[in-house]
Amino acid sequence: MSDLPSYVTRPGEAVHLQPFQCANTQMYGFYLRGDKAAIQQRLVDPVLNTPTDGGITFRAISDLVLLSFAMANRCTSTLAPDSRFGWVPEGSWTLWVPVVTVKRELGIEVAQSLYFYPAYITVDNSWSVAAGREIYGFPKGYGPVELPLQGQHGLRFAASTLVMERYGPDSEGQVRPVIEVTQTEAGTAAGAVWQDIEDAVGAIAHLLTGSGAHLTLPGLNFAHDLARLAREEEVPGVFLKQFRDVADGSRACYQAIVAAGSFVDRFNGGGLLTGTFEATIADFDSHPIARDLGLAPGAQRLEFPFWVNMDFTIGQGSELWTAGQ
């Protein structure tokens, strides 16, 4: 029995009980090659490593990051009473960075556990923004997310949110696109079809271990770890969960590195997309995505485009590290 106080549900409550199930989720994924050193310095270190001051250490494992666009057609809490309230759809865009925790053994950093870290995410559901930030620590922003319709030719994906193009006392925030993915050339043949989650994970493991992605950490067997994830049908996420202090906003009244898994309840299909795809990525002062990836402004060629349709549940989480403990 927890000694924590009961959560007070207020009228118009936006943060509902986890776990959350997202049924009939159509997801599209694209791998983008950035600069591993920039990813570590600008995305991983400030968010996951600096707060813990050596209490736990994360390393980016590759120069490849995953861009995902998803439409979850039916999202609902799985616990009563919230599970009886109804459901909502959600569109999202996420930039995922694969990371591992490391420990020093004989003066060498050795990889321990694999996680996927959402460095940027935009959703079109305000309840999801609140719950994602408050429960798990997802850095969710709010804005429109565009995905292609079924059977549409010339595939296009986009996400927009409130940004500051350049910081300054006279700058006004505007809703602007932060990413756009377009199909620049159609394929001439159908792409490979995956029969189950093991097929999907195996194909991704082959890409990441055979594409010069610089998986150099001792102890890291990425293909083995991904195969384990496929067997357990869980994708482990890692987040920085924190809240500003009411008396001093430069301080956090709560701060923790949190882990939570997304479990595949049912794999409905998937496979490779054919053709070539390019991404145009924002470089605003508030959202310096291109700089964070070590990329110059302009179109970026994408690798390994794929799609999956699945039902999944994001479950209960745990604290890997907590400030003051």
Image (tube, rainbow, N blue to C red):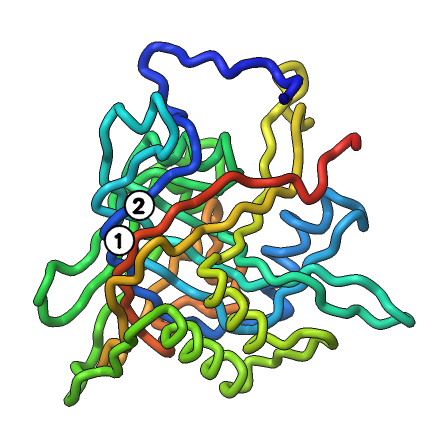
Residue pictured at 24% horizontal, 76% vertical: 273
Identify the image quadrant of residue 225. Answer: bottom right
- Residue 304 in the figure: left or right of residue 35: left
Can residue 290 be seen in the rendering of this structure?
A: yes
Name the quadrant of the N terminus.
Answer: top right
Query: Is the residue under label 1 in contact with that under label 2 (CB below 8 Å)?
Result: yes
User: Would you call the spot at circle 1 few (<14 residues within 10 Å), some (14-19), or many (20 or more)?
Assistant: many
Residue 25: mark in rendering: 1
Q: Position of residue 215 (x, y in %)?
A: 62, 78
Residue 22: mark in rendering: 2
| As drawn, 231 above or below 87 | below
Q: Position of residue 137 (x, y in %)?
A: 53, 38
Residue type marked 2: Cys
Residue furthest right as drawn: 106
User: Would you call the spot at circle 2 few (<14 residues within 10 Å), some (14-19), or many (20 or more)?
Assistant: many
- Residue 111 in the figure: left or right of residue 89: right
Which secondary structure, mark 1?
strand
